Image (cartoon, grey):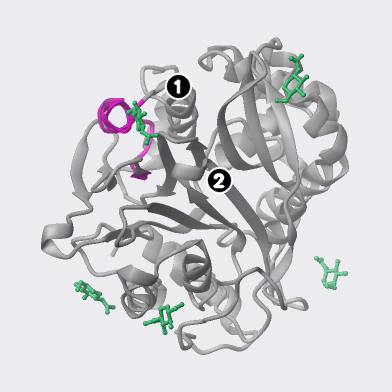
């Protein structure tokens, strides 16, 4: 039994008292695009991040707009921490110890985090905590698919906040709800030219979803494992700093890699703090893969292989050669919808249909992003999953 299975079971215990029988699945959705109806909560606004500015100033426009939501989300995390360890001791520890570590983060991340803390008024340690948190509670679905004309499409649902405060009355996850207004699209520019684009949460400096226009698309899904996050994070806190935070690596690759192959080798070879799945799409036929990572190495790379009939690769949070946990099988419904759509009909629109089908869409889903590399296109949508809906 894995670590994600345990989390899901714990979540199940939290949630079952309030009704629902897993697994809640449905027929593959069609006609959902352009986004409409109750599962579409709103569009995502764009901001420019100017890489020519000093790191400490880069996030000022984003934080100016999103400050109140950031404060409210951090307050929800404080409330959760206080519920676990009353008396505020946990947050006290965060406020005292985490700021000491900011300067050991690789450049430019430490300074960007300091800038976000200064601009928002949120204590530095709590901004660090938010940036760490992410690496621990994300469950997602990502897919790269090639149509019959050689066009590559990349889609993902970002599901966040498992076990983070079930709101009995609203039947929703408190943190997931608080994150929705923080979703932003970012255009990272240098010399007034786009370097890469990303969908992100305001206040977070790593990347989970992004595109380098005309070159590659990239998403990261968490890989839960017992030799996982906690050990690496603990080592990092204790002073062993030779491994990279996963979402810092994705950001660095988006910024610096200039081809699919270069991105692939950096993602496969850099030592990480925790295991991860990287889902990478290129700009030419056959360029799409899932890189399954342990902390030190690439365990497996599954690539699109048209000759073998594999025109897409799809990843949730389980190794592709293993069965998913039966209470959390998002992979089978997602693949069923991909297979039903068929290669000749794949498009941003049909990917959105697949990503709108329960339980691929669930109570944790905060946003859906669709990318088409050849057009340099990234679009994202805030999601909602009205009842009845799976909690994850
Ligand atoms: C519960 O949902 C209602 C209506 O959607 C909303 O106004 C309220 O803020 C939610 N409560 C919490 C704690 O999120
Ligand atoms: C940056 O680019 C935009 C459009 O691409 C243009 O309108 C603007 O004038 C440019 N700004 C500078 C400072 O070059
Ligand atoms: C694909 O990416 C390569 C860099 O790996 C670049 O040289 C090439 O121009 C790109 N092709 C297209 C069609 O954009
Ligand atoms: C989808 O199609 C692939 C390739 O033919 C097959 O291996 C897989 O089992 C199918 N999955 C589902 C859920 O239909
Ligand atoms: C594929 O798309 C065509 C045209 O949009 C449509 O007529 C057809 O029913 C679709 N096929 C499937 C399997 O969805």
Percent x, y of residue 64: 87, 32
Check disc 1: other Cα within 10 Å, few if <14, some if 14-19, many if 20+. Answer: few
Q: Does the magenta run of residues contain 324? A: no
Q: Which residue is mark 1?
A: 238
* Quadrant position of residue 327: bottom left
Is residue 92 in view? no
Q: Which residue is found at the position 35% from the left and 58% from the top? A: 315
Q: Which circle marks residue 377 in the picture?
A: 2
Residue 37 vertical placement versus 300 (above, below): below
Q: Which residue is found at the position 64% from the left and 17% from the top? A: 51
Q: Is residue 305 left or right of residue 19?
A: left
- Between marks 2 and 1, how big is the CA–CA gap? 41 Å
Percent x, y of residue 110: 61, 17
Q: Which residues are magenta?
A: 259-280
Q: Which residue is found at the position 18% from the left and 58% from the top? A: 306
Discs 2/1, front: 2
* Quadrant position of residue 381: bottom right
Q: Is residue 327 left or right of residue 131?
A: left
In the picture, which quadrant includes the N terminus? bottom left
Q: Which element carries disc 2, helix, strand or loop? A: strand
Question: In front: 304, or 365?
Answer: 304
């Amino acid at each position: 039994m894995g670590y994600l299975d345990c989390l899901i079971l714990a979540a199940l215990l939290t949630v079952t008292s309030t009704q629902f029988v897993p697994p809640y699945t449905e027929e593959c959705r069609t006609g959902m695009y352009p986004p409409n109806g109750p599962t579409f909560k709103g569009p995502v606004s764009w901001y420019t991040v100017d890489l020519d500015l000093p790191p400490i100033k880069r996030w000022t426009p984003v934080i100016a707009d999103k400050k109140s939501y950031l404060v409210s989300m951090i307050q929800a995390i404080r409330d959760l921490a206080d519920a676990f360890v009353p008396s505020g001791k946990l947050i006290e520890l965060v406020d005292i110890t985490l700021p000491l570590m900011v300067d050991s983060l690789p450049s430019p991340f430490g300074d960007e985090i300091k800038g976000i803390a200064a601009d928002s008024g949120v204590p530095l340690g709590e901004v660090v905590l938010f940036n760490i948190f992410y690496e621990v509670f994300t469950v997602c679905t990502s897919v790269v698919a090639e149509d019959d004309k050689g066009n590559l499409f990349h889609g993902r649902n970002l599901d966040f906040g498992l076990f983070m405060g079930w709101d009995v009355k609203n039947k929703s996850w408190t943190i997931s709800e608080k994150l929705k207004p923080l979703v932003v699209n970012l255009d990272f520019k240098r010399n007034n030219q786009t370097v890469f684009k990303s969908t992100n949460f305001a206040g977070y400096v790593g990347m989970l979803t992004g595109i380098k226009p005309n070159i590659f698309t990239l998403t990261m899904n968490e890989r839960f494992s017992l030799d996982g996050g906690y050990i690496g994070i603990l080592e990092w806190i204790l002073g062993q700093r030779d491994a990279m935070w996963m979402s810092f690596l994705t950001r660095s690759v988006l910024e610096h890699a200039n081809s699919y192959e270069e991105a692939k080798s950096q993602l496969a070879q850099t030592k990480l703090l925790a295991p991860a799945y990287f889902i990478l799409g290129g700009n030419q036929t056959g360029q799409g893969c899932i890189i399954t990572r342990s902390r030190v190495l690439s365990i497996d790379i599954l690539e699109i292989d048209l000759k073998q009939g594999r025109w897409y690769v799809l990843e949730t949070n389980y190794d592709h050669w293993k069965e998913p946990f039966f209470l959390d099988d998002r992979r089978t419904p997602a693949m069923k919808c991909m297979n039903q759509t068929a290669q000749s009909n794949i498009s941003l629109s049909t990917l959105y249909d697949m990503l709108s089908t329960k339980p691929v869409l669930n109570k944790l889903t905060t946003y859906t992003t669709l990318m088409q590399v050849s057009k340099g296109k990234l679009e994202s949508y805030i999601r909602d999953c009205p009842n009845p809906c799976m909690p994850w």
